[in-house]
Amino acid sequence: MSRPIILPDDFSDHDFMLIMKREPHGRNRVRLLAMHHLQLGESLKHVAKIVGVHWKTVQSWIKRFRLSGFSGLFESPRSGAPRKITGNAEAWLSEKIGSLSEAKTGGYITGKELQQLLLKEHAISCSLKTIYNKLHQLNYSWITSRSIHPKSSAEAQEQYKKTFQRC
């Protein structure tokens, strides 16, 4: 039998389940679910099994609650530089590439051109690496799309498909 968990005094003042249902951040929801089960009297190991973490992790969440109060359960800001291309600029970039790929005359644009367009349209100065990483996030594997050649003939292509013999 495990030792009883000594919870902070104000631990029972919170309705962790209600707060968890309103929380948009996934890792915060997991912590709040764990705290709810601890309120119900579950053991550390059982709670850890429910939320899918090690029991020492649950113990560290309780410690954070003791030291920082209720706000100690929530995610703290991560280190690193903020994103350069976000929100409106990201939507604009995706729309721009989409419109280029639908154009019949071509969809060819280089990373440098996108870099200059972002600087001109949204005043965002970033490296080519950032441009290509953002394109990868937006599921563009190539900047160019398969455009239709201006001299191509749809009828000739259909005729070729009908007469083509497969091996």
Image: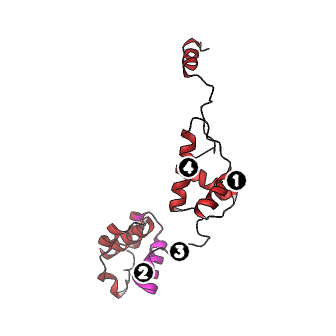
Q: Amino acid at mark 2?
A: Ser
Q: Are marks 3 and 1 in contact (CB under 8 Å)?
A: no
Which residue carries the number 2 mark?
A: 71
> At label 3, which amino acid type do we have?
Pro
Residue on which the image places disc 3: 77
Closer to the observer: label 3 or label 1? 1
Q: Is residue 78 left or right of residue 70?
A: right
How dense is the environment of label 1, judged by Cα within 10 Å: few (below 14), some, or many (20 and up)?
few
Q: Nearer the viewer, mark 1 or mark 2?
A: 1
Sequence order check: which comes first, mark 3 or mark 4?
3
Q: Amino acid at mark 1?
A: Lys
* Gap between marks 1 and 2 measured at Cα: 44 Å
Dot placed on the residue nearer the N-terminal end, 3 or 1: 3
Reading the chain from its start, which is encountered first: label 4 or label 1? 4
Between 32 and 8, which is closer to the camera in this rendering? 32
Q: Nearer the viewer, residue 153 or 145?
A: 153
Residues in magenta, as a range = 51-75
Q: Nearer the viewer, mark 3 or mark 4?
A: 4
Q: Tell me the quarter of the picture where residue 147 sits.
A: top right
Q: Residue at x 45, y 76 (%)?
A: 61
90 and 117: which is toward the camera: 117
